[in-house]
Image: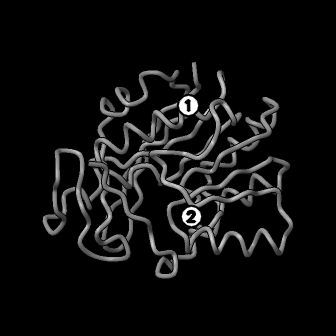
């Protein structure tokens, strides 16, 4: 059984969710040079990356399981008249045609599921982007302090349910490098990087993977 649960964006007040991540800007330039036009922002949240790409001439589709997140993005789209279409949808079954997108970004999104869900989501990513299309996908690392937190509930070797904060009750998939390579075996890996973020009460650790559909 695939476990999934949306964020409540009414309770996620941290300001950085409104600003595009620095890792995304190189992709903006890369994909412009490659002539990519249609992009899917998978797990868009309140739309920080959807807005960035739309402001730079991309035709953006944005999807998230959170109705609150999509609602907040819709208000911005209406005010700015941006070329963004939004849908509330589960990432394990995307409401888009095969090969519909030139590129895709799934930033701090697809690991909010279990072992089955992340495999299904990777399959959906492969389905909706065209041949030679590219995607940036981020994964939770087992190096994160939340993976080691004894208060969180372990479902499997890779999956925990958080028990506190605005992510309480939400499943999280944590990967090793080899786990990711197995998940992405049908793609060509272009870039693979690792980053740790230090905060007062925890350490976050993520992999950033740029892939091409073969």
**Are dots 1 and 2 in contact, CB under 8 Å?**
no
Q: Among all residues in the image, which is located at the extreme left? A: 150
Q: Quadrant of residue 76?
A: bottom right
Q: What residue is shown at x 57% (from left), y 68% (from top)?
A: 17
Q: What residue is shown at x 65% (from left), y 63% (from top)?
A: 47
Q: Nearer the viewer, mark 1 or mark 2?
A: 1
Q: CA distance from mark 1 to mark 2?
A: 22 Å
Q: Element under label 1?
A: helix
Picture disc at residue 168: none
How far from the left and from the top, in percent, is residue 67?
55, 70
Specify whether 92 is left or right of 154.
right
Q: What residue is shown at x 80% (from left), y 37% (from top)?
A: 32
Q: Element under label 2?
A: loop
Image height of 104 relative to 167, above or below: above
How far from the left and from the top, in percent, is residue 167?
35, 70
Picture disc at residue 127: 1
Specify whether 127 is left or right of 116.
right
How was this image coloured?
one colour
Q: Quadrant of the C terminus?
A: top right
Local crowd size for mark 2, using a 10 Å CA cut-off: few (<14), some (14–19), many (≥20): many
Q: Quadrant of residue 46?
A: bottom right
How far from the left and from the top, in percent, is residue 203?
33, 61
Q: What residue is shown at x 69% (from left), y 36% (from top)?
A: 101
Q: Which residue is mark 2?
A: 45
Task: Looking at the image, tell me whether mark 1 or mark 2 is earlier in sequence order.
Answer: 2
Instruction: Please tell me which residue lies in front, 69 or 197.
Output: 69
């Amino acid at each position: 059984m695939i476990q999934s649960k949306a964020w409540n964006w009414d309770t996620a007040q941290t300001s950085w969710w409104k600003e595009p991540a620095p890792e995304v800007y190189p992709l903006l330039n890369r994909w412009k040079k490659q002539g990519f036009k249609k992009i899917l922002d998978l797990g868009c949240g309140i739309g920080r990356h959807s807005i960035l790409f739309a402001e730079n001439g991309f035709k953006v589709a944005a999807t998230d399981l959170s109705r609150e997140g999509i609602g907040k993005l819709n208000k911005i789209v209406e005010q700015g008249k941006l070329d963004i279409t939004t849908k509330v949808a589960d990432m394990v079954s995307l409401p888009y045609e095969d090969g519909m997108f030139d590129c895709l970004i799934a930033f701090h999104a697809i690991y909010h599921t279990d072992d089955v869900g992340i495999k299904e989501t990777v399959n959906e990513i492969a389905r909706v982007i065209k041949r030679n299309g590219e995607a940036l996908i981020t994964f939770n690392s087992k190096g994160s302090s939340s993976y080691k937190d004894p208060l969180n509930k372990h479902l499997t070797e890779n999956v925990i349910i958080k028990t506190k904060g605005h992510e309480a009750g939400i499943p999280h998939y944590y990967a090793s490098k080899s786990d990711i390579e197995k998940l992405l075996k049908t793609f060509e890996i272009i870039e693979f990087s690792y980053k740790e973020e230090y905060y007062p009460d925890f350490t976050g650790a993520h992999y950033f993977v740029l892939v091409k559909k073969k």
